[in-house]
Image (cartoon, rainbow, N blue to C red):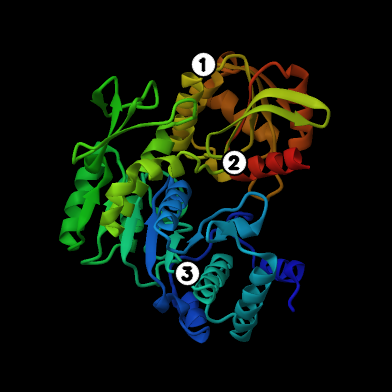
Amino acid sequence: MPSYDGVLKELEHWGSYENTARPRDISRLEGIRLLLNELGDPQNNLRVVHVAGTNGKGLTSLMLGSLIRSEGKSCGIYTSPHLTDIRERIRIKGKWIEKEDFALYAERVLDQAHSFQGKPYLSYFDLLTAVALLAFLEKGMQWVILETGLGGKADSTNVTPKELCILTPIGMDHQEVLGDSLQQIASEKMGITRPGIPTVIARQKPELMQWMRTELNQRSVPFVEAENEIDFIQNGETQTDRPFNGIWGIKWKDDTKLKLPRGQFLSLPWLECMRTAWTAFEMMFPQAIDSRGENLEILSSVKLPARLEYRKNVEWNGHHFSSLVLDGGHNADALEALALQLENWQFTNTTVILGMSGDKLQPVLIPMLEKIFRSCALLIACPFDSPRSVKPKELLRFLHVEIGSEKLPKTRTVRGAKEALGLAAESKENPLVVCGSFYLAGEVMQLLSD
């Protein structure tokens, strides 16, 4: 029986774009195709829903998976990145893949990869994709949801037949790989689509949506816009902006209305993911319209860690935090969603622990960071365990230049997440916000669980 720890060490030797500063080669897919071929082409025997976009991919995938299981169908889900455990990426029937199963399938993939002796090129993500597809086939999944890792057209996941595609909100991110304009990035992500295969599109920026309609029509891709299928309702009236602020419920285009559960945290990004996932689900299972009430109850409990995650009364190392927000968003749209949510919660005098990758220090993020800092009393610049992490002094230097010292809150630097939490605990009455990187959020989550 292969060792779980052993295969993890082998995988780490490949190195990943996520944990290093080296972009992976996405120019070719020969490697993943050959690897899968040698493994028996598991992807050709799966019913695949393919998900691409900039934000909301993971939560949309988990929501759709929950809805599929409500129909009595088994479902495998492949997402990235992981925060504390690599098995987060591969879910079987709603649960992380077992260590023994991961080790078994990973060893088969690694043995085949080693036999290539470096040619053709295989990335870390190629290997994990192969492990996931092999696991889904061996475990008999009736449906599989694949989230792209980076882009779409040349992503490792884009070698499978598919029955449905989903495009979540698209924004500026990974420009060094995907392109410098919104249309270039969207074109890469729309590369998952196929002529004749239906596609569900989440709400997009208006100028991008019109361009996407034209492009998809030219590519003979049938599509449905989730925004036209489901509306948000507030005080009995349809709302299109900021529906989480006093939202009453949702309404389908057939005039079915449902009241959302009260007392639960529903952010705008969460609602957008729900709308997209539900639109896709009812395209796959038209009979499910008779179970909307039960399915709303199912979706209301679906959350992803470190995505606008709000915890109350958190105990750590003898300290107590009354409010803690974990968010790994690192692009403009994600940071703006965080700023908007903090404003909606009416947070004041926050302590913000901020860590970022060096390639994310871009002026386009400044307006969103300024919004986050408006309610901030103390800003703690914190590194995380990755070569991509920017040094705290360099991060503060960037903020001083771009924002100005007079507009920044009081700042401190620390050597790591544990020291940052200790410093934040000195002002434990202030809401604590950890943001800027999924890897920083993961390290904080690990400390809290320990």
Local SS, label 2: loop
Mark 3 crowdedness (10 Å alpha carbons): few <14, some 14-19, many ≥20: many
Question: How far apart are the two marked residues, 1 and 3, measured between alpha carbons?
Answer: 44 Å
Mark 1 crowdedness (10 Å alpha carbons): few <14, some 14-19, many ≥20: few
- Of the image marks 2 and 3, the number of the one nearer the N terminus: 3
Give residue 364's position: percent from left, percent from top.
44, 34
Q: Amino acid at mark 1?
A: Gln
Residue for badge 2: 437
Tell me if label 1 and label 2 are in contact, CB under 8 Å.
no
Local SS, label 3: loop
Whether residue 181 is visible to the viewer of this picture, yes or no, is no
Give residue 340's position: percent from left, percent from top.
45, 25
Question: How far apart are the two marked residues, 1 and 2, measured between alpha carbons?
Answer: 23 Å
Looking at the image, which residue is at 64% across and 77% down? 110
- Of the image marks 1 and 2, the number of the one nearer the N terminus: 1
**Closer to the eye: label 2 or 3:** 3
Residue for badge 3: 141
Tell me if label 1 and label 3 are in contact, CB under 8 Å.
no
Q: Amino acid at mark 3?
A: Met
